[in-house]
Amino acid sequence: MIDKIQQFYSVNTTTGELIKNVNMGVSNKYSIQTILSGDGSDSFLLLATDKVAKNDVILEYSISDNTFFQLNNVNGFYNGVSAPQQYAYDPVKNFVALASFLPGPPSSNLTINIWDFNKKEISSVELPTGPMNVNSIYPVGSYDPTTGNYYIIYSSNVNKSGTYFIVYNLWSNTVVKGPSYFAGFLMEVPQIVYTDDQIYFIDMCIPCSFEIYSVDVSSQSVSKIYTVQTGSNNPFLTSVFGVKGSSIVLFAPVGPSLYETTVIDLARSQKYTSPSVTITTQFHYEWISAGI
């Protein structure tokens, strides 16, 4: 995982122990936006902004060498408003996408930003959803690279007490499902995961607990399937969340300088939580999606 001062950390998901803590040393050159992909062992692909060239780039980061290699770029850079989430990354179609909104008048509709690395451009698609609830940390999305479907949840400025769900296909540029409305269901720190033809909502509220819900879109209902206890002892750490296949990883404080790592295989209904480990490192606003 990478924090906002560009410190790289790796944690053993079995033991919960901190393996690596190193400064990436590129704060003058790059502003890192998110981890796009990686196996967690040797390298990651990152989306970053080249602050000198003023464009967004895909970087390959070597964990062992703490070095970067630029793979691709677009003309221009993203400076919009978005919530912490995993970006949609399609290595075959060669694009990245992100659910966000346009702040302020004349519109604050749900907006999908697209980095097209074939055309070397950034574009945006504004959906006629009506104004977003700008006081929430929606929208967030989950991408299926086998179909091009982008599963997005958002909060409306009209119906603020519920969650909207919509599916937008990034290959055909069309809405293929929804919007559906989950009345009375609103998360503090929302995430969404699509895997094995099933939708899951995750509320990652560290002062509360992590709540994982199975979702029935047809009936607009949710069922709580897991609770991961947390404790807010680090005001600089938000939520660390990663996805690989049907597994999610959650890293959070559980007490004074105590942290646990939880891995849940959603498809197999298996949950593992590491022992509580003392980590005195001061994390700084980590909300870049973790890699597994």
Image (tube, grey):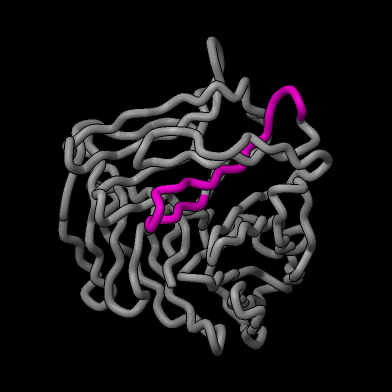
Out of 131 and 178, give the one closest to the viewer: 178
- Please give left or right for residue 232 compared with residue 278 in the image: right
Q: Which residues lie in the magenta part?
A: 142-159
Number of numbered discs on residues: 0
The residue at 42%/67% (across/down) is 291
The residue at 61%/72% (across/down) is 266
Magenta span contains residue 62: no
For the question of whether residue 105 can be seen, the reply is: yes
Out of 107 and 94, give the one closest to the viewer: 94
The residue at 55%/89% (across/down) is 15
The residue at 50%/65% (across/down) is 242
Q: Is residue 130 above or below residue 267?
A: above
Q: Quadrant of the C terminus?
A: bottom left
- Residue 129's quadrant in the figure? top right
Out of 158 and 279, give the one closest to the viewer: 158
- Please give left or right for residue 195 compared with residue 132 in the image: left
Q: Is residue 57 above or below residue 261?
A: above
For the question of whether residue 232 can be seen, the reply is: no
Q: Is residue 52 above or below residue 133?
A: below
Measured as percent of width and height from the top left, residue 43 is found at 27, 71
Measured as percent of width and height from the top left, residue 90 is found at 32, 53
- Please give left or right for residue 285 compared with residue 37 in the image: right
Measured as percent of width and height from the top left, residue 237 is found at 59, 59
- Please give left or right for residue 260 compared with residue 168 in the image: right
